[in-house]
Image: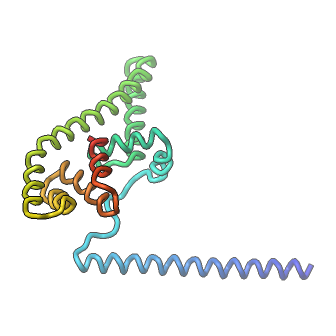
Amino acid sequence: MTHLVLLTLGATLLAGLFTALGVHAYASGLAQRAALIERLSATGAPPPAGRRRRFRGVDRRLRGTAPGRRIELKLATTGLDLTPGEFLVYMLLAVAGTWLVCASLLAPFFGPVSGLIGLWAANAFLNWQRARRTERFINQLPELARILANATQAGLALRTAIGMAAEELEAPAGEELARVADRLAVGHSIEEALGEIVERL
């Protein structure tokens, strides 16, 4: 009996010790994060977190599936600032809303029909955004060619010229060339980096 009491007392003390260490580590992590944000704001740099993303769990699970990767690629081609999880949740909410409204106002038969129309409309919207962005990119090609020609004529390497064009051009060409410059910076070849633009656009 005394062994059981001693074992329970030891386990309780050990759990208390681990709890105290965990609380201390959590508090010190919060303090370090606050100090980092304060230092960055004092230097004028942006805080480490960008726009707060919603539905992170849904996004994480969706990216692991083939439909999720297709949605992610389609969103990358549109230039929308949405994650696949956010797009899926917003689309499902819109489809459910139209389903309920049509089923209650018209007839129950029109609920599923309006849901299918909502899914088709979401896909059509992404295709329209992609076509619109591609057209804007094509309209920027003469300016892009001029910047690249001037930079290479001045003796700069093609990688440097792409980085300069990414800084000077507006979206979508600036964003796409910034992605190419990032790929080149981590060791990808120019053919691979430009091939990704072809896939997206």
Residue at left 34%, top 57%? 188
Where 65 sits versus 36, above or below? Answer: above
Residue at left 29%, top 77%? 40
Horizontal relation, residue 20 to residue 181: left or right = right
Q: Where residue 196 sits: x, y (%)?
A: 31, 47
Q: Where residue 138 sits: x, y (%)?
A: 15, 41
Horizontal relation, residue 145 to residue 83: left or right = left
Q: Where residue 198 sits: x, y (%)?
A: 27, 42
Where 64 sits versus 129, above or below? Answer: below
Q: Where residue 101 sits: x, y (%)?
A: 38, 27
Horizontal relation, residue 112 to residue 46: left or right = right
Looking at this view, is 9 or 145 the one in front?
Answer: 145
Q: In which quarter of the image is residue 33?
A: bottom left
Looking at this view, is 137 or 36 the one in front?
Answer: 137
Horizontal relation, residue 15 to residue 95: left or right = right
Residue at left 24%, top 51%? 176
Image quadrant containing the C terminus:
top left
Residue at left 40%, top 25%? 116
Image quadrant containing the N terminus:
bottom right
Where 25 sits versus 104, above or below? Answer: below
Where 195 sits versus 157, above or below? Answer: above
Looking at this view, is 98 or 14 the one in front?
Answer: 14
